[in-house]
Image (cartoon, grey):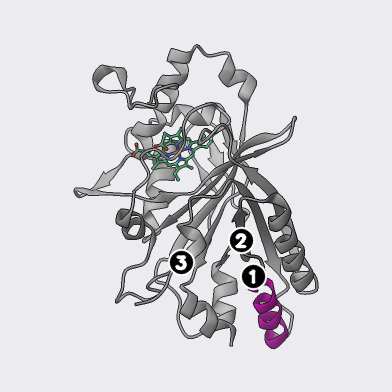
Amino acid sequence: MSQAQSGIFEENTNQFYYLEYKLDFSMDLVVLKQAIKSAVRNEGIGINVVVAFGKKAWNLIQPNWQPVDLVDFKTLNGVQDFSMPSTQGDLFFWIHSNQHDDNFDQVLLIQSALEKVAKIQLDLVGFKYHNQRDLIGFVDGTANPKEDARQMAALIPEGEVGAGGSYVLSQKWVHDLSAFKQLTIAEQEKVVGRTKVEDIELTGDDMPVNSHVSRTDISVDGQAMKIYRRSDPFGSATEHGLYFLAFACEMRRFSIQLEHMLGMTDDGIHDKLIEYSKAVTGSYWFAPSIEDLQSALT
Ligand code: HEM
């Protein structure tokens, strides 16, 4: 049985750091692998380091096989002027623990290992906000799979290429909080599809077809397109939002949800949430199992 990277499922942390890199593909492969190996070396206690690769980078370090669904993220153009850009990267690190200083030590270690072979394209700090809320004030993650259902949703099953690994979607979303805050609480709840304080899903006629929940809670041929979300807020006074991060056993679960959000569906209905928040980055990644990571780097 292949072992997933443990940081994917560690939920008891409140400080996050996200790094995305573009690799220098002209570099000698031995040097490149050595650099990545040093970067994933985790010397801290209680620090989680999850590493994932863009398609091109994975092909380079593991030319013998790749997970069947792995593709680059392509820019999506939806109804009206809504879109989600591709900023496809090569290497992704998600560092998390309960200490920003410990995360930071790990970030410095990663950056010094990679600075000669890769260029940083995203360098972002995330944090837990009022327990488990996102910056629009709603609890985020409630409908996430729990316990064993997390692995079912997040990991490529045994017997398939890349078993124990995971497809990953990351998108930096910037909120227009002043516009969102102009809505009444009842209007905000209709955007999300849940109540704000009690975090209860709207039902019946109260649930709009264009709420975020309506556009992302999707079944195909009777199968729920469950993903395992690990997003957290980021931000400064002038730019803030959600670093959307999710893991899935198949890539179509992401694309189906994104297309529903953008109205790229027969009904042409877009997710009301994208009127108040905009994706400014987008990459698909593969987070290999521990065994597959080790063998790719030898
Ligand atoms: C601005 C960005 C986003 C914000 C602020 C946001 C926020 C939320 C909130 C508050 C909920 C309800 C509570 C919960 O179950 O977690 C939710 C649910 C959900 N979101 Fe998002 N989300 C964002 C982007 C996305 C994206 C890009 C996707 C898909 C790729 C997505 C997929 C989902 C799913 C699958 C659910 C659960 C639906 C259900 O089964 O009830 N979200 N989100």
Tell me where residue 196 appears, x and y as whole percent: 44, 22
Instruction: Let me know if residue 31 is in the magenta part.
Output: yes
Label 2 CA crowd tier, 10 Å (few <14, some 14–19, many 20+): some
Tell me where the magenta segment starts and ends, as one range.
Answer: 29-42
Quadrant occupied by the N terminus = bottom left
* C-alpha span from label 1 to label 3: 26 Å
Determine which quarter of the picture holds residue 261.
top left
Which quadrant of the picture is home to ligand 1?
top left
Q: Which circle marks residue 42 in the picture? A: 1
Q: Residue at x 73, y 56 (%)?
A: 104
* Whether residue 26 is situated above or below residue 203 in the rendered picture: below
Q: Amino acid at mark 3?
A: Leu
* Whether residue 267 is situated above or below residue 123 in the rendered picture: above
Tell me where residue 27 appears, x and y as whole percent: 74, 81
Horizontal side of 198 relative to 25 (left or right) equals left
* Whether residue 130 is situated above or below residue 222 in the rendered picture: above
* C-alpha span from label 3 to label 2: 28 Å
Q: Which residue is mark 2?
A: 47
Label 2 sits on a secondary structure element that is: loop
